Amino acid sequence: MTTTRTTIPPAPTWDLDAIFPGGSRSEQFKQFRAQLRTDLEKAAKAIGTIPAQLDARSQPEWQKFVLTLQDLLERIAVVKGFSGCLAAADVNDSMAQVILGEGDLYVSEWEKLKAAFEPMTLKQSDAAWEQLVGSSELAEIRFFLDELRFNAKAKMTPELETLGLDLAVDGYHAWSRLYDKMAGDLRVEFSDNGATSTLSLGQLATKMADRNRAVRQQAFEKMTEAWTSREELAAKTLNSLAGFRLALYRQRKWESPLYEPLVMARLREDSLEAMWSVVERGVKRLAPYIDAKKKLLGIDKFRWYDEFAPCGSVNKTYTYDEAVAFVVSKTGSFSSDLADFCKMAVAKRWVEAEDRPGKAGGAFCSDMGPFKQTRVFMTFAGSYDNLSTLAHELGHAYHGWVLNDKPFFAGWYPMTLAETASIFTESMGTDAALAACESEDERLMLLDQKLQSAYVLFCDLHARFIFEKAFYAERRKGIVESSRLRELMIDAQRRAFGGLLDESGYHPLFWCSKLHFYATDSPFYNFPYTFGFLFAQGVYARAKQEGPAFAKKYRALLTDTGSMTSEEVARKHLGVDLTKEDFWQSAVDLALADVGQFVKLAG
């Protein structure tokens, strides 16, 4: 039972020693990385000895190399995941940061191996290739291998691909690291309750959800002021990142900058267009929600800094154990398998939840590959939002768990499907919390959080997508000046928000402040979020319709996410066609179903 408390017992820390004892200075972790380096070097030599022709005699050597590629990438993922956990748990762990950089080099070396192997696959007959991928040793990962061979047709020669990877380390990726450093170093002077303090941009972002509008406005203005001082540097960085991508795409003869992100998402462009078309039409249905929120907030113009203003309130606080019990109980009513996993993950201390200084912000889930374990990172301070985050991240962890018995390549799912289990589990918790509401204020708060998610994913994320498409179209012709970047961003927001934001309320420097525009591992790091949200809505709707009978189907769906395209998963497990608008319309309808209830409560 939850009550109002001034303090709650400390939440637990995770057990990382079960992976490698001793943290970033672990001798076992050091040996693990040393062996990985050795094996990467061996593989680089071994690829030159693989018979050029694939046939019955050479097939065992080809199989061995493919399995070596898989093993190396799985171990690289452990290095990146484990060091990422250490760096998040202690932001001052400099050794963990060094190892994270090490991991980037391992990824580059592995990509070179893949770049050398890809053209070899193209020289083989379809019959010989079929014999290889249909063999008992590789049958489970044939989707990954077929995809690799297909994508190889659209790449440069091995020599040029290797050159591109080498240049990217200190060029392309370096620009991204420079942006991270620039953003991390920015500080502002912030005044609150008569006191002035120095805040990082991460700390400043939390002020955007303050109940006091003056605080939110000051936070926005300070953020704008900070980025204005770095605007030209940010513009140079963004232009350089895009220039590198476009030069590479030109050499590969990729006409659209969407080619790579769609391949990575295992998604067809007509599916993406169908989704955005339905979303854009649905935005106007959020107008009553925004109007009601304006009345609750006592404002006449809805601006960027009002988006996360809270409505309603809840006096409940949860201990960590209560939050866990809540998640286990609500997931158990649908799937005992999911509930049992949540209990096990908590019992084995796979969750880092302690509220303490020195931790990174945010939350994430990281799989540990051959260890068949997962780790969840978050900070639990007793709020419902913390409970929701716990459910979300345990959903991610369950997704990884059901893929444990699959080979690593068969568990490599795209970003479009990565949010399915997390949003599904979070949605169960939200609905359960709404059903157990003890006051109208609490119900208003929960409904606001649900609709706020739809608002952000329909408007904010679409604006990012529109901006990037427009930016890349202009960047092909030359450098895009910062003043023009402001114009493109306002134009994108004007279209995506469909009048929900006042004309005075746009964020012209959003292209500066949003790190997703500067991420080099995921171009167009926007649409997968909206896709994942809506796809999860569709899966959750099916679960509500079929009840516990859907639990086994749900697990089967998650199991296939690493071995199918996004469209194939939807067709097989939901019987829907993502290239048509019907599915997206039903998902948008579900996401907006609570608008009327919110307006009524707010009235």
Image (spheres, grey):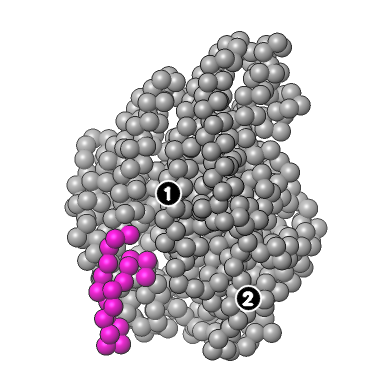
The residue located at (40%, 43%) in the rendering is 520
Q: Secondary structure at mark 1?
A: helix
Q: Tally the marks.
A: 2
Task: Name the residue that disc number 1 marks.
Answer: 98
Residue type marked 1: Val
The residue located at (62%, 26%) in the rendering is 66
Does residue 246 lie above or below 185 as drawn?
above
Residue type marked 2: Tyr
The residue located at (62%, 35%) in the rendering is 71
The mark lying in front, picked from 2 and 1, is: 1
The residue located at (31%, 51%) in the rendering is 179
**The residue stretch that appears in magenta:** 184-203
Regarding residue 98, the answer to whether it shows in the image is: yes
Regarding residue 151, the answer to whether it shows in the image is: no
Q: Earlier in the sequence, mark 2 or mark 1?
A: 1
Task: Name the residue that disc number 2 marks.
Answer: 320
